[in-house]
Image (spheres, rainbow, N blue to C red):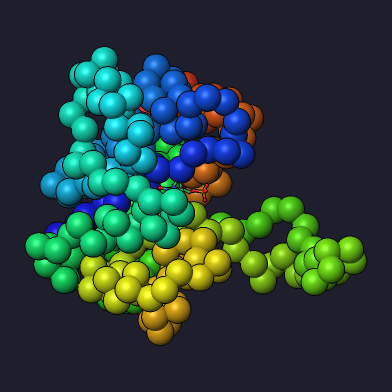
Amino acid sequence: MEITVIVAAGSGSRFGGDLPKQFLPLAGKPMLMHTIDAFRKALPAGRILLVLSPGMVPLWQNLCADHGMQSPEIIEGGSSRWESVKHAIDSLKGAPASATVLVHDGARPLVSAALIKRVLAYAKNTDGALPAIPVTDSIRKISENGVSSEAVDRAMYRAVQTPQAFSLWRLREAYSLPFEESFTDDASVIAAAGFENIVLVEGSPENIKVTTPIDLVIAEARLSMALDTPDTSNN
Ligand code: C5P
């Protein structure tokens, strides 16, 4: 059994604007609808939980009515990504402990079915799986005082994406730990609970997290390309 948790309760402060970015139009519909569609296509029998900040629920319901979309189950978000995921995990009281849960950022609308299935396949016999890509920029590590910096070997680093997949029982255990600032994704929470066999799966440079306005332009261009060339399944 597969359950996807799509976290979309962020305020999008780095993006700017009145409306959080996940509700902005992208190739004809709100960004979040592309994200949901990707999971419905990849896992037609799967269950989806959509985490929204309570203040955004009426807007979302109106958008769904306008676009003829049936919303996934809505869960109330929290003040951090960690808290939003925790609310979703806590709401899964009746679900089997062995279920595989994929946690995905609502702001990654370009995720492909192939990537979702790849992550899921690796999560089955490990402590968890997450997509990652090599970093293309050179990387420098800044000192404690933030003034000096030194070059590091970028070949030793990977940029981490979502969806990240884990068994529900591991997530329950990990999300019962107190919050730490270093919890920027789910793999960091799982690792803090002592689960070490977390595998990196080939991610995709196209699976961007829409963070600044230029990312929205890139996503729009990619989606219009996809309409011309429907086979994007390997990315
Ligand atoms: O802030 P960041 O870009 O890392 O957020 C990643 C994802 O987590 C976004 O999809 C955002 O909507 C979600 N999030 C959330 N609840 C928060 C903060 C972020 O669901 N309080």
Q: Position of residue 143 (x, y in %)?
A: 82, 70
Q: x, y percentage for residue 139?
A: 76, 61
Residue name at image x 32 percent, y 38 percent:
54
Q: Indicate the position of residue 34 as horizontal and vertical percent values.
A: 36, 32
Q: Is residue 209 visible?
A: yes
- Quadrant of the image containing the N terminus: bottom left
Q: Residue 198, how many percent across, how many down?
A: 42, 74
Q: Residue at x 52, y 43 (%)?
A: 209
Image height check: is 83 above or below 34?
below
Above/below status of 169 relative to 71:
below
Horizontal placement of 151 versus 127: left or right?
right
Q: Nearer the viewer, residue 135 or 181?
A: 181
Image position of 135 with respect to 6: above or below: below
Q: Residue furthest right?
A: 148
Q: Looking at the image, which residue is at 16% across and 71% down?
A: 97
* Residue at image location 33% in from the left, 61% down from the top: 86
125, 26: nearer the viewer: 26
Residue 22: image quadrant is top left
The answer to whether any part of residue 111 appears in the image is no
Q: Quadrant of the C terminus?
A: top left
The number of numbered discs placed on residues in the rendered structure image is 0
Q: Nearer the viewer, residue 38 or 90?
A: 90
